[in-house]
Image (cartoon, grey):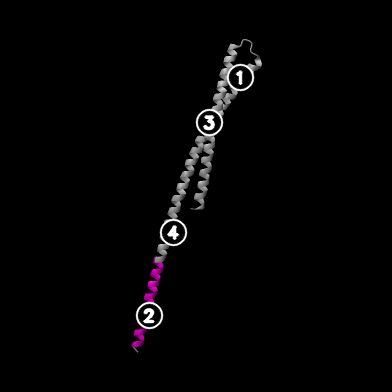
Amino acid sequence: MGANEILFGLITAAIIALVIFLIWFIVKLIGTARALSALIETADQALKEASGVDQALKDAIGEISQNLRSLRTITDDVGAVTSDLKSFSGAVRGVGQGVQGLTTNVKELSDLVQNLGKETVASVCGVRTGIKTGFEVFLKNLLAGK
């Protein structure tokens, strides 16, 4: 297992952990939003039933309503970030597969060069032996001819 594969494995694990944390965070935000919504509904009913409600209470309820809208916006933004992280995770997975394919191609090329080197050495040895034998026969015939 190469260093690149380990690195991509760690990156993938970190992204998965982040996605799990964001999903948990979104679930908690949704629960908070529901609780705030129930609080606002209860407060609105209390306002309708009460005849002399103080202006400060109305302002507080308006502020809670605004906070709830902001919380919904944040929840939507976190959902968008989660979607982007899923896309990024897929891209990292694709890069990892590309590196793995490149590693396979380099290994095949290395094997091919190694085999070519073996064949070249065998050819050179054969030519050298042939030349040596030819000279020996030539010299033997030349000296025998005297």
Q: Which comes sooner in the sequence, label 1 or label 2? A: 1
Q: Are the residues flagged by discs 3 and 1 in contact, CB closer than 8 Å? A: no
Residue 10 rendering spot, x and y as whole percentages: 52, 46
Residue 62, labelled with which disc?
Answer: 1
- Residue 129 in percent (x, y) is at 38, 75
Above or below 15: residue 115: below
Query: From mark 4 to mark 2, how far is it between C-alphas?
Result: 38 Å
Instruction: Kindly identify which numbered label has been placed on residue 49.
Output: none
Q: Amino acid at mark 2?
A: Phe
Q: Point out the frontmost of discs 4 and 2.
A: 4
Q: CA distance from mark 3 to mark 4?
A: 52 Å
Q: Residue at x 45, y 53 (%)?
A: 103
Left or right of residue 111, residue 24 in this image = right
Label 1 Cα neighbours within 10 Å, binned few <14 / some 14-19 / many ≥20: few
Q: Which residue is mark 3?
A: 27
Stretch in magenta:
119-144
Give the Cα separation between the discs numbered 3 and 1. 25 Å
Spatial separation of the CA atoms under disc 2 and disc 3? 89 Å
Q: On the image, numbered disc 2 is attached to which residue?
A: 135
Q: Residue at x 56, y 24 (%)?
A: 35
Q: Quadrant of the C terminus?
A: bottom left
Q: Most extreme residue toward the top, as rendered?
A: 51
The residue singled out by tag 4 in the image is 110
Depth-wise, is mark 3 or mark 1 nearer the camera?
3
Disc 1 marks a residue whose amino acid type is: Gly
Q: Earlier in the sequence, mark 4 or mark 2?
A: 4
